[in-house]
Amino acid sequence: MSLDNTNILEMHNISKAFPGVQALKDVSFQLKPGTVHALMGENGAGKSTLMKCLFGIYKKDDGEINLNGEIANFKSSRDALESGVSMIHQELNVVPDQSVMENIWLGREHTLRIGPFHLVNHKRMASETGKLMEQLEMEIEPRGRMGSISISHQQACEIAKAVSYNASVVVMDEPTSSLSEKEVNHLFKIIRRLRSQNVAVIYISHKMSEIFQIADEISVMRDGEMVATAPAKELDEDKLINLMVGRDMSQRFPTVEAIPGKVEMQVKNLTSADENSFKDVSFDLRRGEILGIGGLVGAQRTELVESIFGLRPVVEGSVTIEGNDIGIQTVKDAIASGMGLITEDRRGAGIFPLLNITENTSMPSLDRLTNKAGLIDHKTLLKQSREMNEKFKTKTPTMETPIKSLSGGNQQKVIVARWMMTLPEILIMDEPTRGIDVGAKYEIYCIMADLAKAGKSIIMVSSEMPELIGMSHRIMVLCAGRKTGILKGEERTQENIMRLAAMFGHDDFKEEDAS
Ligand SMILES: Nc1ncnc2c1ncn2[C@@H]1O[C@H](COP(=O)(O)OP(=O)(O)OP(=O)(O)O)[C@@H](O)[C@H]1O
Ligand SMILES: [Mg+2]
């Protein structure tokens, strides 16, 4: 039997409103079996909401969903899973205190009957999980505690879980946001295998290059509406961006006009207290300079910048600002010395989910906006919070909306706004544009360029080569916790970054090359 021309899933005229936002307007979507269908669109366009309506997490206001030609109205995600629709969520929802296998089989544990008792059959669960991991070529210990494995492994477990349901439709909402390149390739292998088994995959991502590697078809949403669906081979990056943002974006990076001035910060021989982390890292950061930090996942870039910011202990080395050893011990010290850090893990550590946009934006600026009598200057606080979010075009009904009801990318914009509002002299940005759409990326780049022009110093950790090259004056590369080199001017090429990123431990690595 050939299903080639039949859609496995059809969504007709779906509408969904939240207080103050019409998140979906009359959206229709068709999915063929055995295809990878990318769903693209700016932050807040409605991608996750559409998928959550399918999955029974949100109740649609209007419209009809057909699965295999039958009306599907899932009341819960359990319902959806049992009908063969699984979803890997943008926000990981794992139970950290349970084991990997318990997370995967949650709610459908294998049981063992002993007299009147039903006991969880841990042995069987472990062997089934082991088989699943083997089938997916994942090296994850079934009995390991979920909270103790890396974010990327947690994400891999979510994928394993989705696969374990033998789904005919698998939704992946930004599955690669915290995966390394190797893991991404592995995921693609899994996706291709699913496709060859006639499974349909809906793939949501802001990473353009991924889309063209994996997608057969592409649908684009804008402001809650479906604006186009086309075979991937009929589109290219420029056409796709045009559909997403509704205008041409010939320029991906603004010109960085700033010319670095005198040295603002000096990091000397910094060595982490964790012996598996970074060691003996030295570099200068000038006023008006954007210093990129490149490297592969595991290069210890985040650990380095978090240590500079007082979040992790060091055993050796110094950080001086304008010649003074500031001896940063805590985050408070760092903020007081004029630093700001936009963390990589914005969804976990970055947001206060129940607090509103104003509160989430202004938190670290409270000290600055409190007078000697201890009174907070609310007027300025509200004004600056609003202005910062307007600058980034944060899409929210009001400033009083709790941050958790914003789309993933918009939550990230609030966190960027938060640290901009502290008016830092030295801004450290760890993967600042991860999960952020192309239009908003450009806004962030412009702000970086403006800050540099105003004499501020910026450190940007990034895994995106074009961003490192397009925005940094110099690029420092780390490999396995060692600085393997600094690239400037014409040296800043993808090849050079890759070479340095894989260098440590190779015969051609010499300490002196790294200066
Ligand atoms: N639970 C909710 N309560 C209120 N508003 C919501 C809720 N979920 C989503 N929204 C709003 O609906 C709109 C669409 O959000 P959605 O999360 O679907 O966007 P998205 O396309 O997935 O964006 P991103 O790329 O940033 O993940 C946004 O304006 C968002 O603020
Ligand atoms: Mg989303």
Image (cartoon, grey):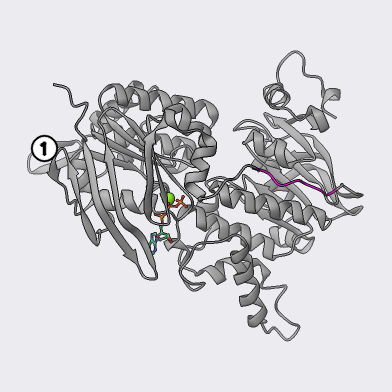
* Camera sees residue 209: yes
Q: Quadrant of residue 394?
A: bottom right
Depth order, front residue of 363/280: 363
Q: What secondary structure is marked by label 1?
A: strand
Image location (x, y in percent) of residue 107 = 23, 45
| Three-letter code, disc 1 | Ile
Which residue does the numbered mark 1 point to in the structure image?
114
Task: Report whether 57 appears left or right of 276.
Answer: left
Q: How many marks?
A: 1
Q: Can residue 94 be spotted in the picture? A: no
Q: Quadrant of the C terminus?
A: top right
Left/right placement of residue 431 relative to residue 232 reads right
Q: Is residue 510 above or below residue 80?
A: above
- Front residue of 448/302: it is 448
Q: Which residues are magenta?
A: 251-258
The residue at label 1 has a CB less than 8 Å from ligand 1: no
Identify the residue at image location x=25%, y=59%.
59
Given residues 328 and 158, the one toward you in this image is 158
Q: As displayed, is residue 403 above or below residue 308?
A: below
Look at 17% across and 51% down and name the residue there: 73
User: What is the quadrant of residue 187 in the picture?
Assistant: top left
